[in-house]
């Protein structure tokens, strides 16, 4: 596994093809790489081997990939931590294991391209933590969200206590962990678990459609949204405003921005229409 510095550097090496993986179903369609968790018999529970494959996949995105769609093969996104492996760990091993999860999910959050998660069925525990590391979440009606850590006598360990409260708030997360409350897909889109809710069976197609769109953005804009926006949003306002000005200056001075703005002024590109 890589170290934290390399996970967050955004400079992971590119390759011509995604590395082979036993537990991931990987497919490239144009600029979009779809990455499917592929342990449907175990409801895509996240064991060490699968985590290692995710880490390797995101560390070596093929050349030309502009967005990634993360989904689950079968009826579920993921049932979370593979509980059969937890049985064997002592406290020190548990600490190192949690930090390994952080490195893997950081790879996703600080990926060089946007990552869109397509959610269905169980999005539970570590599966929800994984979904939170993506930049956009798309759910279909079968999706449901739960944190059964409380009833299993454990705590989140994959960055969930950092990422999930930023989406749904501390009180809602505390309620889920203390009482075992489960949220439906329809509730999830209202409360911030997902940004999109599709028809039955529609999450993967919608995620692929969104991924094609974001892959066509100027690379510097995507960089700014993924790498700068989260830091600016957490910074004190004065620091944030300066960072924003610097990022805006870099983005707008890029040739890509000039070309795109010229295309609008010459009426060669789409207008913004009402939703
Ligand atoms: C698993 C896991 C798993 C399924 N680890 N093996 N996560 C949980 O507490 C969720 C536990 N799973 C469930 O509640 C249910 O399995 C589901 C609601 C997700 C799906 O139910 P169902 O009826 O479709 O499937 P099933 O029969 O329960 O499971 C099919 C198989 O997958 C079965 O194995 P089999 O050998 O008996 O066929 C299950 O044991 C296996 N399976 N989920 C291991 N999670 C970094 S900290 C993160 C902490 C957490 O993630 S805590 C949350 C853990």
Image (tube, rainbow, N blue to C red):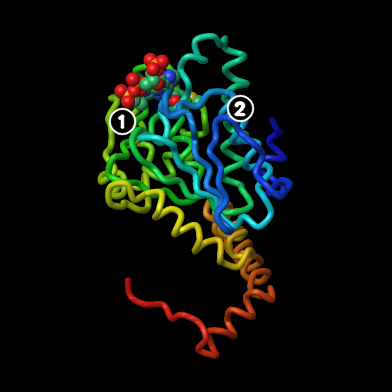
Q: Residues within 10 Å of mark 2 (few under 14, many from 20)?
A: some
Q: Residue at x 66, y 43 (%)?
A: 8
Q: In this rendering, which labeled residue sits more in front, label 2 or label 1?
A: 2
Give residue 179's position: percent from left, percent from top: 28, 25
Q: Nearer the viewer, residue 40 or 224?
A: 40
Q: Residue at x 28, y 51 (%)?
A: 199
Q: Is residue 88 above or below residue 207?
A: above
User: For mark 2, what is the residue?
Assistant: 99
Left or right position of 141 against 158: left
Where disc 2 sits, the SS reads helix
Q: Nearer the viewer, residue 231 or 271?
A: 271
Give residue 28's position: percent from left, percent from top: 57, 51
Residues at marks 2 and 1, CA–CA distance in whole angstroms: 25 Å
Is the CB–ligand 1 distance for label 2 below 8 Å?
Answer: no
Task: Tell me if I can see residue 125 in this picture.
Answer: no
Left or right position of 31 against 134: right
Q: Which mark is residue 150?
A: none
User: How many discs mark residues in the rendered view?
Assistant: 2
Is the CB–ligand 1 distance for label 1 below 8 Å?
Answer: no
Where disc 1 sits, the SS reads helix
Q: Which badge, 2 or 1, is on the more N-terminal residue?
A: 2
Q: Which mark is residue 175?
A: 1
Q: Residues within 10 Å of mark 1 (few under 14, many from 20)?
A: few
Q: Residue at x 58, y 81 (%)?
A: 261
Q: Residue at x 63, y 80 (%)?
A: 259
Give residue 122's position: percent from left, percent from top: 35, 33
Query: Taking the image as four quarters, which one is ligand 1 found in?
Result: top left
């Amino acid at each position: 596994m890589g170290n934290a510095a390399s996970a967050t550097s955004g400079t992971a090496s590119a390759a011509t093809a995604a590395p082979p993986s036993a537990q991931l179903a990987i497919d490239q369609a144009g600029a979009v790489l779809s990455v499917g968790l592929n342990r449907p018999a175990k409801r895509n529970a996240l064991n060490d081997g699968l985590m290692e494959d995710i880490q390797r996949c995101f560390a070596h995105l093929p050349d030309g990939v502009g967005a990634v769609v993360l989904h689950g093969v079968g009826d579920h996104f993921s049932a979370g931590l593979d509980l059969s492996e937890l049985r064997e760990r002592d406290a020190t091993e548990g600490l190192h294991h949690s930090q390994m999860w952080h490195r893997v999910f950081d790879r996703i959050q600080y990926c060089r391209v946007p990552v869109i998660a397509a959610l269905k069925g169980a999005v539970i525990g570590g599966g929800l933590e994984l979904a939170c590391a993506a930049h956009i979440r798309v759910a279909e009606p079968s999706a449901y969200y739960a944190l059964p850590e409380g009833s299993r006598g454990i705590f989140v360990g994959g960055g969930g206590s950092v990422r999930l409260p930023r989406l749904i708030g501390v009180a809602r997360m505390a309620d889920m962990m203390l009482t075992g409350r489960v949220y439906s897909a329809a509730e999830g889109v209202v409360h911030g678990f997902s940004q999109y809710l599709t028809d039955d069976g529609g999450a993967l197609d919608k995620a692929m459609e969104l991924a094609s769109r974001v892959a066509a953005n100027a690379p510097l804009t995507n960089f700014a949204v993924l790498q700068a926006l989260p830091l600016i949003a957490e910074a004190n306002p004065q620091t944030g405003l300066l960072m924003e000005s610097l990022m805006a200056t870099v983005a707008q001075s890029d040739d890509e921005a000039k070309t795109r703005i010229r295309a609008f002024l010459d009426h060669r590109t789409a207008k913004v229409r009402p939703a």
